[in-house]
Image (tube, helix red, strand yellow):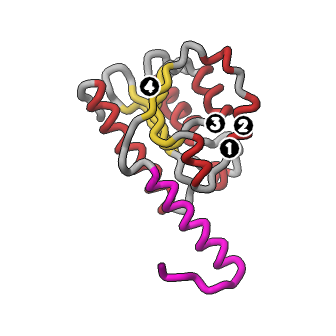
Amino acid sequence: MCNHTTEELLIECGENVIDLAIGNVKAGGLPFAAIIVNQKGEIIGKGVNQVAKLLDCTAHAEIQAIREASRNVENSSLKGTTLIASGEPCALCYMAIRMAKIMRVVIVSDRYEAEKHGFDYLWTYNYRNAALFHELELLTLDNDRKLLPFQLAKINLSVSAQLSTGLPVSNR
């Protein structure tokens, strides 16, 4: 539960989403995680990117969190909630956020930081209609650990690539 003042809520939930993303990377997944909190600061949904695991191209962290939150509140409308994401949502996720009526999104790492660490989904923004998002409040959370999930994932991907080619893996 993230039940503190708004600033404390964002800091605590930001830490939670970073830890969730790190856990997903350690389990062999990607560094994308999301949580949704209601107006009381209670976590009502969590998600991690499970595209490869579920063989489902829509199983992004934000969409997984929306699915869980909707089940938990027994409603497809998540009006009044806040979504906190380890990486800025792609265009698909922004549309799902809009469809769920979530009006506040807090990102820990933006799309350009993700790109610098090997996760380039900038092309998806070519399909995003900015006119649909004028009501969406978008905040960026400053956190010293924000890039850790992306750094760990980059290392994991590098090691996996070396293993698949039969090259020796460096211990560094």
**Mark 4: few/some/many CA within 10 Å (<14, 14-19, 20+):** many
- Say if mark 2 contacts mark 3, CB within 8 Å: yes
Is disc 1 placed on a helix, strand or loop?
A: loop
Mark 4 or mark 1, earlier in chain: 4
Q: Nearer the viewer, residue 4 or 50?
A: 4
Mark 4 or mark 3, earlier in chain: 4
Spatial CA span between label 3 and label 1: 7 Å
**Mark 3: few/some/many CA within 10 Å (<14, 14-19, 20+):** many
Mark 3 or mark 1, earlier in chain: 3
Q: Position of residue 94 (x, y in %)?
A: 61, 28
Q: Which residue is mark 1?
A: 121
Residue type at mark 1 is Tyr
The magenta region covers 147-172
Q: Is residue 30 magenta?
A: no
Q: Quadrant of the N terminus?
A: top left
- Say if mark 2 contacts mark 4, CB within 8 Å: no
Spatial CA span between label 4 and label 3: 17 Å
Q: Which mark is residue 90?
A: 3
Left or right of residue 42: residue 120: right
Q: Which mark is residue 82?
A: 4
- Say if mark 1 contacts mark 2, CB within 8 Å: yes
Q: Is residue 151 magenta?
A: yes
Residue type at mark 2 is Thr
Q: Can you tell which of label 4 and label 1 is closer to the viewer?
A: 1
Residue 82 figure quarter: top left
Spatial CA span between label 1 and label 2: 6 Å
Q: Can you tell which of label 4 and label 3 is closer to the viewer?
A: 3
Q: Position of residue 38 (x, y in %)?
A: 38, 23
Residue type at mark 4 is Thr
